[in-house]
Image: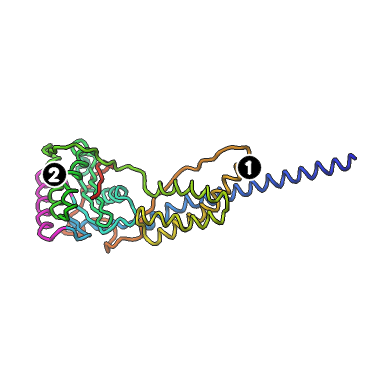
Amino acid sequence: MNLAMNRYETTNRLKDCEMGCGFRTAWARSLIVLLVVLAVFPLVHTAHALEIPPLKGYVNDYANMISKPVQSKLEAELKAFERTDSTQLVILTIPSLEGETIEEFSIRVAETWKIGQKGRDNGIVFLVAAKEKRIRIEVGRGLEGKLTDLTTGRIIDLVVKPRFKRGDFSGGFVAGASALIDATKGEFKAEEVRPARKGNSLSPIFTLLLFAGVGLLFLGSFSRLVGGIAGAIGLPGIAFFMVSPSLITLILLGLLGLVMGVFLPLLFSGIGHGRGGTFLPGGGFSTGGGGGDFGGGGGFGSGGGFGGGGGDFGGGGASGDW
């Protein structure tokens, strides 16, 4: 009798050990995969981020939105403005953001070009992405008191956007630049006050991953195969309609969706069979497209010796669309 009881207890202990070891192994593998994905994906984003074009002058029309006569006019006016006021205002148009948010790209441009004077930080970047129909006014730290988020938002909404909607892009840039110049002198006035769009909004990719994670967790709870397939197809599919990413970004999102669909349910189910705790994974990232069509690396001074003076930017300004 005692021998039978000992065998029974030994068998139960072995089963408990096998279950515990299996849980720890599955949990450890899932955690390692998740950490690897979160660590590698930002590096991929950096490697394939949209290339910053060379700074050629006050007007950098890489999307061919401004007529040549207007470009010459703006170039002369902005040069005269810097000479008299020391404030440096540059215009940049690009064909597409390639999946990157305009706020992320504009701050990278501002930091690379260093528009404005060092110590005074009095630079302005007037950026437009043609494909996404996005507008961004990036303001140097030294001008944030005059060009507040509210003021730059009103300039976009009341001055630039109406002209862009009519297809008058050249007129929109002329009027927008003029309004910015007036605002730096305290002379800009508008009849309406509209809230400016903040530049520090959550990345669309982060929002996509948040909702995709919940959906894949639900599907994967029924079948990890279904979750993996849904993630591999659904994540890049939704991203295509949300932010129009590049091909390499879609492929990477597909792989990420596959990993999330297979391992997130395993991770949560493993923890659910433990002591009943709940784990909420945090963190996120954003991704840009691969390679721009600018034909040059970052930097400036490639056009007639024009270049930024070392100004600093802190994310002030506003964004909009038309």
Residue 73 magenta: yes
Q: Quadrant of the N terminus?
A: top right
Amino acid at pointer 2: Ala
Q: Quadrant of residue 97?
A: bottom left
The mark closer to the camera, 1 or 2, is 1
Q: Nearer the viewer, residue 237 or 202?
A: 237
Disc 2: CA contacts within 10 A as few (<14), some (14-19) or many (>=20): many
Q: Secondary structure at mark 2?
A: helix
Q: Is residue 235 left or right of residue 195?
A: right
Residue 213 magenta: no
Q: Is residue 225 left or right of residue 176?
A: right
Which label was assigned to residue 77? none
Q: Is residue 46 above or below residue 279?
A: below
Disc 1: CA contacts within 10 A as few (<14), some (14-19) or many (>=20): few
Q: Which region shows up in magenta?
A: 66-89
Q: Residue at x 59, y 50 (%)?
A: 29
Q: Is residue 209 left or right of residue 161?
A: right
N-terminal label among 1 and 2: 2
Amino acid at pointer 1: His
Badge 2 is on which residue? 179
Badge 1 is on which residue? 273
Residue 27, position as x, y percentages in the image: 60, 47
Q: Nearer the viewer, residue 142 or 36?
A: 36
